[in-house]
Image: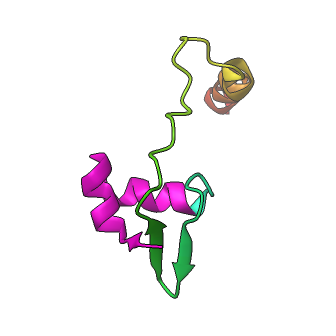
Amino acid sequence: MEYLSLHQTADKWGISVRRVQTLCAGDRIPGAVKIGSYWAIPADAEKPKDARIKSGKYLGVRRKTRGKKEKQQSFTEV
């Protein structure tokens, strides 16, 4: 089986080297193997689909922002 480097894969897929590293570290590229500090990616591996939300619905946004106003008000009172 033939393997490609991070740079070769990034050029092939048209994305950054850092993004390919992130995909490898997150087990998003089947067959990718880390050899020391280098990643070996199968030449026939396909670029994973974009997993970001595209519908415009962002879940859990209120949970992250809840309480910020209360904290800001308590700081201004002091």
Q: Is residue 71 visible?
A: yes
For the stretch drawn in magenta, the main secondary structure is helix
The image shows residue 68, relative to residue 17, as above or below, that is: above
Looking at the image, the residue that sits furthest to the bottom is 36
Asked whether, in this view, residue 69 is left or right of residue 9, the answer is right
Residue found at x 54% / y 29%: 52
Residue 16 lies in the magenta-colored region = yes
| Quarter of image, res 65 | top right
Residue found at x 51% / y 36%: 49
Q: Which quadrant of the rendered structure holds the C terminus? A: top right
Looking at the image, the residue that sits furthest to the front is 1
- In the image, residue 51 lies at what x, y percent? 56, 33
Q: Nearer the viewer, residue 12 or 59?
A: 12
Q: Nearer the viewer, residue 7 or 75?
A: 7
Q: Which residues are magenta?
A: 1-24
- In the image, residue 66 lies at what x, y percent? 73, 22
Residue found at x 44% / y 57%: 44
Residue 48 lies in the magenta-colored region = no
The image shows residue 66, relative to residue 49, as above or below, that is: above
Q: Is residue 15 visible?
A: no
| Quarter of image, res 47 | top left
The image shows residue 17, relative to residue 48, as above or below, that is: below
- In the image, residue 11 lies at what x, y percent? 24, 55
Asked whether, in this view, residue 16 is left or right of residue 62, the answer is left
The colour scheme used here is: rainbow
The total of numbered circles placed on residues is: 0
- In the image, residue 59 lies at what x, y percent? 69, 20
The image shows residue 1, relative to residue 16, as above or below, that is: below
